[in-house]
Amino acid sequence: MSQATVIGLGEMGAALAGALVRGGRSVTVWNRTGAKAERLVREGAVLAPSAADAVRASPVVVVCVSDYRATRDVLETKEVAAALAGRALIQLSTGTPKEARDAEAWTLRHGAEYLDGAILAWPSQIGGTETVLLASGARATYQRSEALLRTVAGGVTYMGEAIGLSSALFAAVLSYLAGRWIGLCHGARICEVEGLSVASFGATLARLAPVLGEDARHMGEVIEKGAYANPESTLGTAGADIGRLVQHAEEAGINAEVPRFAAALFRRAIDAGYGAEEHAALIKVLRT
């Protein structure tokens, strides 16, 4: 038997399998399109002829496909489900906390252990000492799998036994990133129309990274404690600044939907009486 099986050889799955092989693990792989395994086989992985054979090959089965629906398509066949008994299934596909809970229940019914994971990294970062992978599920299962997980992500973090915790934090981080990516692209349009270097804009944001990280930490504490009073800069001030982004977009003739959306949220918060509070008081209108 090999030490681990990896099912799914898209960019992330292939990166996981490659890191395990380079980390000295014996690895079995399977993918609907077998050609994707060729490089990994040259590096030392073994390609299983079927998903069921891949599951039978190892005590630990790592699944990394597009989503939980795709996972079910692979695992919920009679032969594969029967092969899972006595094994540990580590789900690293993207999904919601409810999907994680449903997957755990199904896996336990078929006699296997289950860990749910979320990768906070790009494929090129897999195998790094600082790469973050969140894992939740039974502590004993995590402890038996920890060394294997650290081969692919040195920053693996155990979230706890509640199975949905990893996917919940992943969703929270993705929400932040979505706003960041959209904001960066609108900022790039400002640079383009005003004759600024977009690359220099990106470099400026990189230099601000420590400050922005501290702001994120501060806002998290403010929201958790409900301590919105006495800010350095108020929600009202920020709302006025964002309003001027709408003005600029209209004057420059560029797409204004991003600043309009943001300005409308801040206006709701100001109209609700939160203008003198921390920027994080915006969450109050998102709770209603």
Image (cartoon, rainbow, N blue to C red):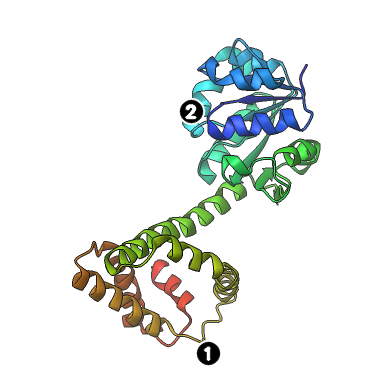
Residue on which disc 2 sits: 70
* Residue 165 seen in the current view: yes
Residue 165 image point, x, y percent: 61, 50
State the CA–CA distance, disc 1 to disc 2.
Answer: 49 Å
**Quadrant location of the C terminus?**
bottom left
Q: Position of residue 179 (x, y in %)?
A: 42, 60
**Residue drawn at x 64%, y 13% as measured from the top left:** 48
- Residue 172: x, y in percent? 52, 56
Total count of labels: 2
**Quadrant of image for the N terminus:** top right
Say whether marks 1 and 2 touch (CB < 8 Å): no
Amino acid beneath label 2: Ala
Residue in the image at 56% along x and 44% along y: 122
**Going by the image, does 112 lie left or right of 267?**
right
Residue 230, numbered label: 1
Badge 1 amino acid? Asn
Q: Residue 62 — which label?
A: none
